[in-house]
Image (cartoon, rainbow, N blue to C red):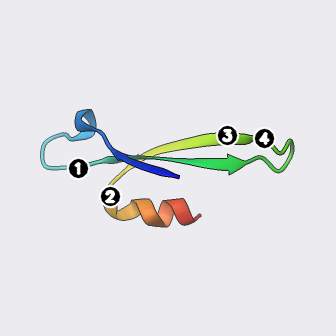
């Protein structure tokens, strides 16, 4: 699990964070990466799910 603040995502007064997590596929057992851009307050809740 990773959390990264990207300078190009900071527009105006909003500060956004790009979060990346690994998810295991139940069908094949392979890992994939899921990316999402959100506010820093929501990152921990998103990573827990």
Cα–Cα span, label 1 and label 4: 33 Å
Of tags 1 and 4, the one toward the viewer is: 4
Does 23 sit above or below residue 10?
A: below
Does 13 sit above or below residue 6?
A: below
Cα–Cα span, label 4 and label 3: 7 Å
**Disc number for residue 15:** 1
Q: Residue at x 44, y 64 (%)?
A: 44
Q: Count residues near mark 2 (Cα–Cα under 10 Å), then give few for <14, some for 14-19, many for 20+.
A: some
Q: Are marks 4 and 3 in contact (CB under 8 Å)?
A: yes
Q: Indicate left or right for 24 with 40 as reference.
A: right
Q: Count residues near mark 3 (Cα–Cα under 10 Å), then give few for <14, some for 14-19, many for 20+.
A: few
Q: Are marks 2 and 3 in contact (CB under 8 Å)?
A: no
Q: Decide which of tag 2 and tag 3 comes sooner along the chain.
A: 3
Q: Decide which of tag 1 and tag 4 comes sooner along the chain.
A: 1
Quadrant for residue 6, please give it: top left
Q: Indicate left or right for 45 with 31 as reference.
A: left
Residue beneath label 3, please?
32
**Disc number for residue 30:** 4
Residue 24 image position (x, y, % from top left)? 73, 49
Q: Count residues near mark 4 (Cα–Cα under 10 Å), then give few for <14, some for 14-19, many for 20+.
A: few
Residue 1 image position (x, y, % from top left)? 53, 52
Cα–Cα span, label 3 and label 1: 26 Å
């Amino acid at each position: 699990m990773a959390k990264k603040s990207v300078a190009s995502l900071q527009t105006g007064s909003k500060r956004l964070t790009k979060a990346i997590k690994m998810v295991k596929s139940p069908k094949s057992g392979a890992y994939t990466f899921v990316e999402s851009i959100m506010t820093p307050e929501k990152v921990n809740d998103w990573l827990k799910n």
